[in-house]
Image (cartoon, helix red, strand yellow):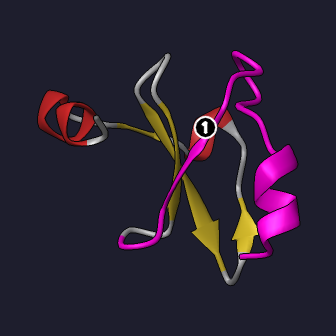
Amino acid sequence: MDKELFEILVCPITKGKLIYQPETQELISKQIKLAFPIRDGIPILLESEARTISQEEYDALG
């Protein structure tokens, strides 16, 4: 994923910072505990496509 693009992307719901998770190819919004997928290098920032992250996943983010 392009670093410049990553720096300007925000959560479509909260407008807060997203955390890139290369292992899962997702962008995480800690505020609302949602993970947005990245498919073929394209972030899918739709609430309907996001998954809720578990408390364990949330805690691992630091």
Report whether 16 appears left or right of 20. Answer: right
Q: Report if residue 20 lies within the magenta region.
A: yes
Vertical side of 40 occupied by 44: above or below: above
Magenta stretch: give its range.
1-23
Q: Position of residue 30 (x, y in %)?
A: 45, 26
Residue situated in front as seen by the camera: 42 or 7: 7
Report whether 38 appears left or right of 29. Answer: right
Name the residue beneath numbered marker 1.
48
Residue situated in front as seen by the camera: 43 or 21: 21
Quadrant location, the C terminus: top left
Q: Position of residue 1 (x, y in %)?
A: 71, 76
Q: Amino acid at mark 1?
A: Ser
> Residue at the location (77% across, 21% down)?
15
Q: Report if residue 8 lies within the magenta region.
A: yes
Q: Position of residue 61 (x, y in %)?
A: 31, 40
Vertical side of 25 occupied by 51: above or below: above
- Residue 2 occupies quadrant: bottom right
> Residue at the location (70% across, 56% down)?
44
Helix, strand, or loop for circle 1?
Answer: helix
> Residue at the location (69% across, 22% down)?
16
Report whether 42 appears left or right of 28. Answer: right
